Image (tube, coloured by chain):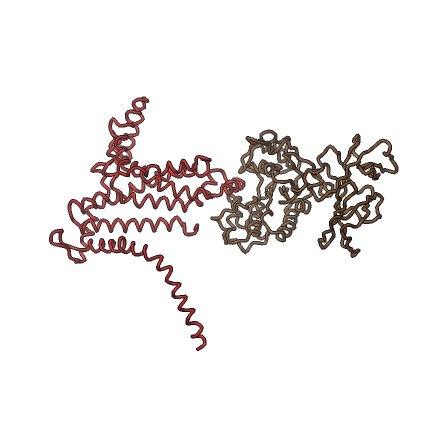
Amino acid sequence: MTEAVSAGPARRRRRRLNWVPYALLAPGMLWLIVFFAVPTVSLVSQSLQTGDVFNGYTLTWHVQTYVDALSTYWPQLVRSLVYAGLATVFTLLLGYPLAWFIAHRSGRFKNVLLVLVIAPFFTSFLIRTLAWQTILGNGGLLETTTDALHLSWLLHGFESFLGLVGLGTGNQLLYTPFAVVAGLTYNFLPFMVLPLYANIERLDLRLVEAASDLYATPASAFRKVIWPLSLPGVVAGTLLTFIPAAGDYINSVLLGSTQTVMIGQVIDSQFLRVLNYPLAAALSVSLMALIITFVTVYVRRAGTEELV
Amino acid sequence: MTEHGSGDLRLSSVTKSFERFTAVDDISLTIPQGSFFALLGPSGCGKTTTLRMVAGLEQPTVGTIHIGDADITSLKPYQRNVNTVFQSYALFPHLNIIDNVAFGLRQRKDGDWKRKAQEALDLVELGHTAKKKPTQLSGGMQQRVALARALVNRPDVLLLDEPLGALDLKLRRQMQLELKRIQSEVGLTFIHVTHDQEEAMTMADTIAVMNGGRIEQLADPSTLYEKPASTFVANFLGQSNLLPAEVSAEVASVESGVVTVRTRDHDDIAVAAEHLPPGIRSVWVGVRPEKLRIGEAGRNRLRGVVTDASFTGVATQYLVRLPWGKELVVVQQNDGSGRLPVGENVTVSWDPGQEFILDQAQDADAGVEIDDD
C-alpha cells in the first residue's frame, strides 16, 4: 500500500525520462526504415517475384531465379570478390606505410598530408577514374614518360608479366584486369589510410622500444606488437575498402573490357537495360549475402572484438 | 646471441649530444656487478639519457660502454643482455600478463619459458594474475609485472627508469623495500634512475648525483649526505645551512685537528682541519639542520632570533635569523622540551666536525628548490 503510493510518481517520472533516448533515435530510425529496411525487404521480395515490367509482378516465391542468376553470372560474382580482394590487399600494402609515415614521421606536415589524402574527394569519382584512361592508355602519360626516359622495356616487361599472371593481355595496360584493380586501389586508398592513421597515431611507440629491449628484432617487434595492435585499424580499413569495391562497376566500365565485367555491371544492365527485375534483385541479394558471410568470417578470424 | 658474459658495467668518457644541447657530457663510470646503483638528479640532468644509452635505445656520440670485457657500444637493444623497467611500464596491452612476462624468453627461444615466467610472477607476488590483461591491474601491480618481465631474463644489468614515479607515496615506500629485497635475492646489477633523493638513499649502495650532464659526486648515501662535494649535492640531498667564512692567517690556529674560521659577523667557528680543502681561504661552512641545536650544548655558538617555527610531528623546524640576515634552518627532535615562540632570542650551537666545507666560489643556491617535483 505505502509502496504503491511512494513508487507511483517515481515510476511515472522514470517512464517519461525513458522516452528521451527513443526520441533521439527516432529520426535516424525513421530514415533507416524508409531508405534501408523497406528497400531491402522490397529487394528480397522482388527477387522472388515473377512477371514482367509491363504486366506487373506477383510474389510467387520463385527460388529458381537464384539458381538461374548464380549459374549464369557466378564468374562475374567471383571476379568481383577477387578484384575487390586484390584492391584491398594493395590499398593495405600502400596505405599502411603511408599511414605510419603520416602518424609518426611527418612532423609539422602531418595535417597537410592528411588533407592531401582526402584531396581527391574534391573531384568527382567519375572524373578521377576517367583520368586513369589518359594515364594508362596507349600513347598515354605513362607510355610517353617511359619512352622519354628510355624505359619502355620496363613497361613492356610489366605488361608481359601481367599477361602471365592473368591480370592483363600482355601488350597493354588499359582495358585489362590490372587497370580495373589499379583503379579500385586508387579510388579506395583514402578509405584504407584514414582508419589506419587513426589507429596507428594512437599506437604507443614506447612499446616498440620495450619489445626491442626484450630481444625483439624490428621485424619481430612488428609482427608481435605493432601488427596486433594495428588490427582494429586494419579491419576497419579493409572493410571500408572491400565492401564498396566488391559492388563497384565504374572502374570496370571505364578501365576494363568485356573480360573484366564485375557483378555491379551485370546488376546495372539487368535492372536498367534488360529490365529483368527479379534476376537483378536476386544478384543483388546474393552479393549482399556473400559479403556479409565474408565479413563475418573475417572479423571472427581477426579476433578484433578482443582488442576493443 | 646475447651471451656476452657478465661483469662490471663500464662507461668510458660517454657523451651524448642532441641537435641543440649536450644531454650527457663526458661521463665515466664503473658500476660493479651485483650492486644497486642509483643515478640521481633533477629532470634534464641527463640521467635518463645515460640509462637509454646503456639499454641501447640511444647511441653515444662519443665514448664506449662495456659489460665485463665485451664492448656493447654499437649493439642494438635486442642484442644486449640488458633489460629495462620503463617509467610508463610499457606493458603490451594485447597480451595477457604471463605472455608479457614471457616475451623476452620466447624471443630467445627459451623452451622453459612457461615455468620461468610463472616463477618471476610469483616472485613479485602476482602469480594469480597470469591470465589477466594489463589494463585489469592497478598501477602498482603493472609496475611489478614490468619488473618481472625484465627480471625473468636474468640480464647482466637491469635498468629502472623512475619506475616508482607514478605510484602514490605509501605504495612507493612499499615497492622500494620490495625492489631492494628482490635485488639482493637475484643478485643482478640494478641501475635505478630517479629524481627522488630519498628513494635513491633508501635503496642504492652507490649513488651518482648528476647535474647538467655531468656527475657531481659519486659515493655511498651517507658520504653524499655527510660530505657533499659541491653546493649542488649539499642542497639537492636534504637541506643545508651554508655560512660564508674566511680562513685568515691570524685566526687559523691548528689545535688538536681543529681550525678556526671567521664568519661575516666576526664570530669564530671551529671546524675539523681534515674537512678543510687545502689552499682555499674563502669557504662555505655547511651544517645540516638536524646537527644544529638550540642552546649552548655545542662548542660553536651563534646568536639569532626565531622567525618561524613549524611543527611536523616528529620534529619542529625553526628558522633562526642571524644578525647579518642569514636564516638558519634548525630541526629539533620532538623530545618533549616544548616549542620556542617566534621572536625569541636563541643561541644555536654545534660541535666541530659535524660540518662540511666547500669552496665559496660555488653557487650557494645550486640544487635548491628542485629536489622534488
Q: Residue furthest bottom?
A: A1
Q: Residue furthest right?
A: B255
From the viewer's perspective, is A161 left or right of B305? left
Split into 4 quadrants, where in the image is the N terminus of chain B?
A: top right
The spot of residue B364 in percent (x, y) is 72, 37
Q: Nearer the viewer, residue B310 or B169?
A: B310
Quadrant in which residue B217 is drawn: top right
Q: Which of A145 and B252 is in front in this view?
A: B252
Query: Is residue B274 shown to the viewer in this render?
Result: yes
The spot of residue A80 in percent (x, y) is 26, 43
Residue B17 drawn above or below residue B367: above
From the viewer's perspective, is B245 left or right of B65? right
The spot of residue A300 in percent (x, y) is 37, 51
Quadrant in which residue A189 is drawn: top left
Q: Residue at left 45%, top 42%?
A: A201
Residue B24 drawn above or below residue B294: above
Split into 4 quadrants, where in the image is the C terminus of chain B?
A: top right
The spot of residue A244 in percent (x, y) is 30, 44
Q: Nearer the viewer, residue B166 or B65?
A: B166
Q: Residue at left 78%, top 43%?
A: B322
Chain with colour red in the figure: A
Q: Residue furthest front?
A: B343
Q: Chain B is drawn in which colour?
A: brown
Quadrant in which residue B39 is drawn: top right
From the viewer's perspective, is B262 left or right of B36? right
Query: Is residue A166 shown to the viewer in this render?
Result: no
Residue A205 drawn above or below residue A8: above
Please give the count of numbered marks on the rendered protein: 0
